[in-house]
Image: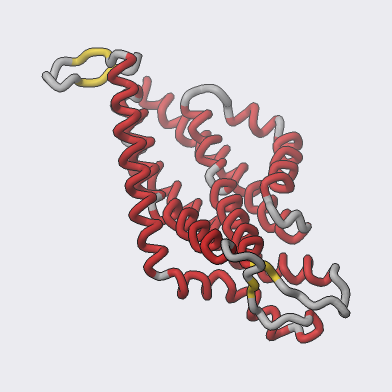
Amino acid sequence: MIGRKSKSGDQGNMSLVEHLAELRMRLIRSILAIALGAAGVLAFYDPVLRFLTKPYRDLCTERADFNCDGSLFALGPLDGLSARMRIAGYGGLILALPVLLWQIWRFIVPALSSKEKRYTIPFIGSSIVLFLSGCGLAYWTLSRALQFLISWSGTDVNQAFQITKYVSLVTLMVLAFGVGFLTPLLIVFLQLVGVLTPRTLIRQWRIAIVVIFFTAAVITPSGDPITLMALGLPLTLLYFVAILVGFLATRKRAREAY
């Protein structure tokens, strides 16, 4: 059971019903945050769509041999609505990220010691920075990924992208990079709780790199080698940074224990 203070101020253990009630409260707050974020994206849908299509439009301008003008096409009456809802949903998720992380942390924090609770701000702050860094890298890589994919069509093929498929590619790619960049935090956390040790992680670095690139190949929706390398190489670097952070944190904790 997770120990925490009850409403009466006494220290006790939460029952299963209390756990479920708190989980429901955290979920409701998270859903409301996503809904508000989605509403904000809907209010600025046209600028957001122009931002998402800018790499494609710039590529068409730079490469006349690609036979494209940067336009997107709706091939069915529901394509426009589907694309709009998809952008709003994923955009709301990204905008609500600080709230989501805070709700997750507040749910697990009663199980942590007072020393572990001091990692609240670093955890949330680094999560936001890493996630947004991954999203930014995905956006920066998008034009290069599109260039690689379009080049396989041949010079005589006109490019006519369906809006729902383009939006799916962009949003899934951004989320894949964003979530991928959060893995170093998981590695640091596992070291702090003693599940893994820095020595074990260093000893298994070859296997870790294979897993990183395999995972990157699976989660990247475009499947092109440029996107694979753009995600795999930073994650490899972050893997070793996470080991270093975990080593310093565990050594500091051992010093404080004495």
Residue at 71 percent of width and 84 percent of height: 62
Q: Is residue 235 visible?
A: yes
Residue at 33 percent of width and 30 percent of height: 24
Question: Viewer-proximal residue, 232 or 160?
Answer: 160
Q: Is residue 138 visible?
A: no
Q: Quadrant of the N terminus?
A: top left
Q: Position of residue 107 (x, y in %)?
A: 34, 30
Question: Viewer-proximal residue, 184 or 241?
Answer: 184
Q: Quadrant of residue 63?
A: bottom right
Q: Quadrant of residue 11?
A: top left
Question: Viewer-proximal residue, 5 or 165?
Answer: 165
Q: Determine the residue located farthest toward the left in the rendered image.
A: 8
Residue at 50 percent of width and 60 percent of height: 87
Q: Is residue 12 rendered to the left or right of residue 223?
A: left
Q: Quadrant of the C terminus?
A: top left
Residue at 41 percent of width and 64 percent of height: 42
